[in-house]
Image: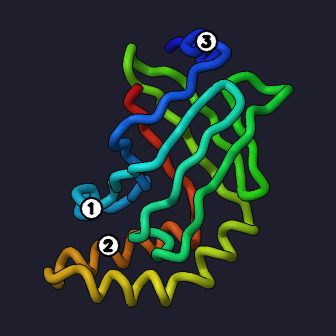
Amino acid sequence: MKFLSISFSLFLCFQSLADTYIVPVLSPELEDFNSFEILDAQIAPKFLSFTLPPELGSTSMRKVVFEASENIPNTFVSVFGIAHCLQNADSQIECNIEYNSIYKELLIELLPKTELELEQTILSAQELAHRTDIARQFSSDPIGVLILDI
């Protein structure tokens, strides 16, 4: 693995057309439903930003911005949590994100709205059940992996 700082020049900011946010799941039957497209992710030496997919936090979610840690390489911090990012391929950066109790409380508060929005947009009963399970799991244990194609 290469360190993130090696991958960037000081003034570059990468934004791809579509990145992926993955929620770890314990049940194999949820694996086909645990990845989400992210359209607004940006990463640069000083920041990481993206909007959580509505399937996890309703359409009320706002862009989360993490700032580069001054003390820990390849790490970005926010009032909502921490992201550890490494370049795992020539054209891909993987960020493991752990949200804190502040963000967890927000997700729990928005869960009824998230579930309602899922009910209004998903036609398949099986997909709805799986997506709802993932949203509930994520709100109680808000961790994920952001894969950025650069």
- Which type of secondary structure does the marked residue at label 2 adopt? helix
State how far apart marks 2 and 3 are (Cα): 39 Å
Residue 119 as seen in the image, left or right of residue 96: left
**Residue 6, numbered label:** none
Residue named by callout 2? 131
Residue named by callout 3? 9
Chain-order first, disc 1 or disc 3: 3
Query: Tag 2: residue type?
Result: Arg
Residue named by callout 1? 33
| Mark 2 vs mark 3: in front | 3
In front: 133, or 57?
57
57 versus 50 height, above or below: below
- Which type of secondary structure does the marked residue at label 3 adopt? loop
| Mark 1 vs mark 3: in front | 3
- Which type of secondary structure does the marked residue at label 1 adopt? helix
Do the CB atoms of the residues marked 2 and 3 lie less than 8 Å apart? no
**Picture quarter with the C terminus:** top left
